[in-house]
Image: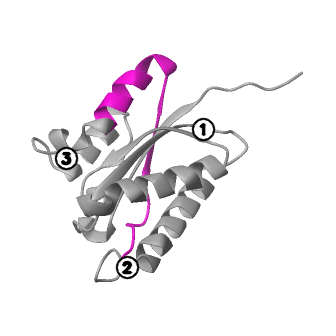
Amino acid sequence: MSTYTQLYVQTVFSVLNREPLLNISWRERLYKYIIAIINNQKHTVLAIGGTDDHLHIFFRHNLNHRIPDLMRVVKRDSSTWIKEERLVKCRFLWQEGYGAFSYSKSQAEKVINYINNQEQHHAKQSSYDEYIQLLDSFGIEYDKKYVF
């Protein structure tokens, strides 16, 4: 008997101290690089987007790889790429930690649209407030001093 799964996950993580370092002039290149990292880990990216200080990635999760391991590889390899490409003049680091939120297939289109419209969304709401709202809507307990 084979095992079949369908798990949709949105991850959210930010630049260290929410510094606005993800310049729009090269952000699409970063997205393509991260998509390749995730696809190489046998997951399927459905949407990736963000602003100058954080990213959202929505993907179909492959159960053979743990989300913490995937996020470690994504953050490590993408920050190395940013440094090697000399895309920022200062030291680049991602904030420690991330958020991971699960969705049903029926919610996928809504999540994709939300991620694809991050710039417009954040004209109305800060990324910090957005993250708190996500944590609250998923019923996740947190300590504000550790919220990135």
Residue at the limit of the structure toward the right, as seen here: 1
Separation (CA) of disc 2 from disc 1: 31 Å
Q: Residues within 10 Å of mark 3 (few under 14, many from 20)?
A: few
Instruction: Give the residue displayed 49% in from the left and 22% down from the top.
Output: 104
Comes first in the chain, label 3 or label 1: 1
Where, quadrant-wise, is the C terminus in this rendering? bottom left
Relative image position of residue 37 (x, y in whole percent): 57, 55
Instruction: Give the residue displayed 13% in from the left and 43% down from the top.
Output: 125
Residue at the limit of the structure toward the bottom, as seen here: 90
Q: Are marks 2 and 1 in contact (CB under 8 Å)?
A: no
* Residue highlighted by disc 2: 86
From what the image shows, is residue 72 above or below residue 66? below
Residue type at tag 3: Asp
What range is drawn magenta here? 92-115
* Membership of 39 in magenta stretch: no
Relative image position of residue 12 (x, y in whole percent): 39, 49
Specify whether 58 is left or right of 40: left
- Please name the colour scheme applied to the rendered image: one colour
From what the image shows, is residue 118 above or below residue 113? below
Q: Are marks 3 and 1 in contact (CB under 8 Å)?
A: no
Comes first in the chain, label 2 or label 1: 1
* Residue highlighted by disc 1: 61
Kindly identify which numbered label has been placed on residue 129: 3
| Secondary structure category for the residue under label 1 | loop
Separation (CA) of disc 3 from disc 1: 26 Å
Residue type at tag 1: His
| Secondary structure category for the residue under label 3 | helix
Tell me where residue 145 sits by quadrant: bottom left
